[in-house]
Amino acid sequence: MSKSHPTSGAVAVDGVTYDWRLQREPHQSDDEGWKGMTLALLQRDAKREVFVEFPPPKRLLKGLPRGRLQLDDATIARCVRAALSAGWEPMSRGRPVTVVVDAEGN
């Protein structure tokens, strides 16, 4: 039986539910080199989304093959907290904001 890796879901942080989805997998850009994966986060019943960008995995920078994504609830929760502390206001209106985090989601 193979273990599936989710590309969307929901996580509760401090009593509030946030929906998340994989926006972009790590990929190589012609002008910027390797770019890390990006998650889209949205608080339930809110208006404004946030994009959380991870750095490119070190294995890609070394020329190794791509691995499977490792997303768990703890990492997603850290991403939500990092976005909120960076000034993301889920209930405001406007374009999605982008927050850059480290490999652990902080």
Image (cartoon, rainbow, N blue to C red):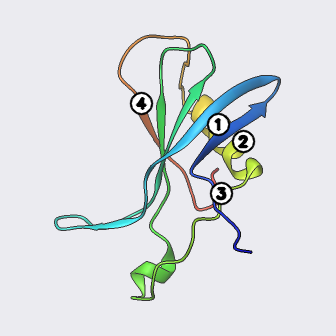
Q: Is residue 23 visible?
A: yes
The answer to whether mark 1 and mark 2 are in CB contact below 8 A is: yes
| Mark sitting earlier along the chain (4/2) | 2
3 above or below 63? above
Which residue corresponds to the image point at 63% horizontal and 54% vertical from the top-left?
Answer: 6
Which of marks 3 and 1 precedes in the sequence?
3
Picture coordinates of residue 31, whole percent (x, y): 17, 65
Residue designated by label 4:
97
Left or right: where 82 falls relative to 13: left
Q: CA distance from mark 3 to mark 2?
A: 10 Å
Cα distance between the residues tagged 4 and 2: 17 Å
Q: Residue at x 47, y 78 (%)?
A: 66
Q: Identify residue for label 3.
A: 71
Q: Are marks 1 and 3 in contact (CB under 8 Å)?
A: no
Image-based side of 70 in relation to 96, left or right: right
Type of amino acid under label 4: Val
Q: Amino acid at mark 1?
A: Val
Given residues 10 and 26, the one toward you in this image is: 10
